[in-house]
Amino acid sequence: MLEADGTHSGGTRKHMELQTLDEEAINILARALGIELDPEHLKGVMQNFKTIAAFAAMVCEFPLDEDIESALVYRLCSPAPE
C-alpha cells in the first residue's frame, strides 16, 4: 500500500471507493501531496476523479485469462491499410 509519505508498505491492495471521495477527501489528498487547492477548483477536481475512476473500472472489469502472461516487449504497430 502506498503510504502518505510516498513509501510502499506491501500487503493487500486497497483502493478508495468513489463514494468516499468527497470534498474533505480531496482536500486531505491535496494536503498529503503538498498541493494548495483553490476552493473554486474543487468541483473540477472531483469531476476529474470521477472520470478517472470510470476509466479505471473499465480496465479492472476487463476479463483476463489467468494463464496469460504479459508481454516482455511492446512495439508500436503500423495502422492496417484501408
Image: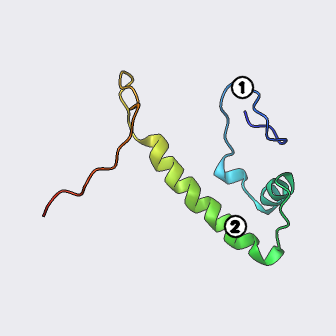
Residue at image location 34% in from the left, 49% down from the top: 76
- State the residue in front, 32 or 22: 32
Judging by the rendered image, the residue that carries numbered circle 1 is 10
The local crowd at label 1, few if under 14, some if 14 to 19, many if 20 or more residues have their Cα within 10 Å, is few
Q: Where residue 81 appears, x then y in whole percent?
A: 14, 60
The local crowd at label 2, few if under 14, some if 14 to 19, many if 20 or more residues have their Cα within 10 Å, is some
Q: Residue furthest bottom?
A: 40
Q: Secondary structure at mark 1?
A: loop
Judging by the rendered image, the residue that carries numbered circle 2 is 45
Residue at image location 72% in from the left, 33% down from the top: 1
Q: Residue furthest left?
A: 82
Q: Is residue 60 left or right of residue 75?
A: right
- Given this view, does label 2 or label 1 mark the residue nearer the observer? 1
Asked where in the image residue 34 lies, by quadrant, the reply is bottom right
Q: Where residue 55 appears, x then y in whole percent?
A: 50, 54
Q: CA distance from mark 2 to mark 1?
A: 28 Å
Q: Secondary structure at mark 2?
A: helix
